[in-house]
Amino acid sequence: MGMEDVRELRDVLERVEGKLIAAGKMYGAMSFAVWLVILMLYYVLLAIMNPPWQFNVLYWPVAFALAMKFSGEIWKRFTRLAGMEGSRKDDIKIALVWSLGFVLGWIVVPAVLNRPVDTEIGLALLTFISFSVGGMFLVAMRSEKEVIPAFLVPALLIPIAYGMEAGTSLMAGFGVGLGYSITVLLYLYSAFRAIER
């Protein structure tokens, strides 16, 4: 094999690697984008229907199941494309982090605060997301720097939310949406750069 052949082979391998990296980044973007759609649909439905609190009991479990199904399908396709297998250990760590985040955000925070209900809901959401996504980043996704705004933006809004008397839950929802939007944008930018290589 001559030097020209080696160079050509290296170029082909770099292009393939770039496409695999881009596919991984696009998977990350889609995973956060599906939650953006769910969150924004929730606020639109709230504004149109003004449903009773029981609506949450139906909406969020159904939304969670649909998001997990969508993310799972995308992940299966990506792992098949990349010829890799997901780590069961990482899956368990991530599930544990989200469970702890749920307990901290939705049980501990409202129990220890003596704030208006809307403020408690906003703080619960911000705490849940910042702890859960931040924990997921630390235990299994340290190389995915694009994820940082998804937990950093909600975390930075916690002290602001604590001082609010009204509109806290709305601000918290849009704060989470802002963090997720930045994450989607960063993932797509990384995918574009990987394809350009």
Image (cartoon, rainbow, N blue to C red):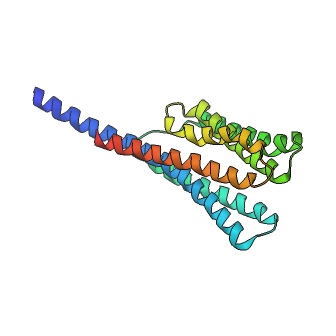
From this viewpoint, is residue 3 visible?
Answer: yes
Residue at image coords 45%, 39%: 84
Residue at image coords 39%, 40%: 21
Q: Residue furthest bottom?
A: 49
Horizontally, residue 159 falls left or right of residue 142, namely: right
Instruction: Please state the horizontal and vertical placement of residue 144, each as a whole percent of the image.
Output: 50, 35
Residue at image coords 16%, 29%: 6
Q: Quadrant of residue 4?
A: top left
Horizontally, residue 27 falls left or right of residue 21, namely: right
Q: Who is closer to the viewer here, 130 or 67? A: 130
Instruction: Please state the horizontal and vertical placement of residue 147, each as a whole percent of the image.
Output: 54, 39
Q: Name the quarter where the C terminus is drawn.
A: top left
Instruction: Please state the horizontal and vertical placement of residue 186, each as a whole percent of the image.
Output: 46, 43
Q: Who is closer to the viewer here, 115 or 137? A: 115
Q: Is residue 9 above or below residue 43?
A: above
From this viewpoint, is residue 79 visible?
Answer: no
Q: Name the quarter where the N terminus is drawn.
A: top left
Q: Quadrant of residue 150?
A: top right
Instruction: Please state the horizontal and vertical placement of residue 160, each as a whole percent of the image.
Output: 72, 42
Count of all numbered marks drawn on residues in the image: 0
Residue at image coords 68%, 42%: 157
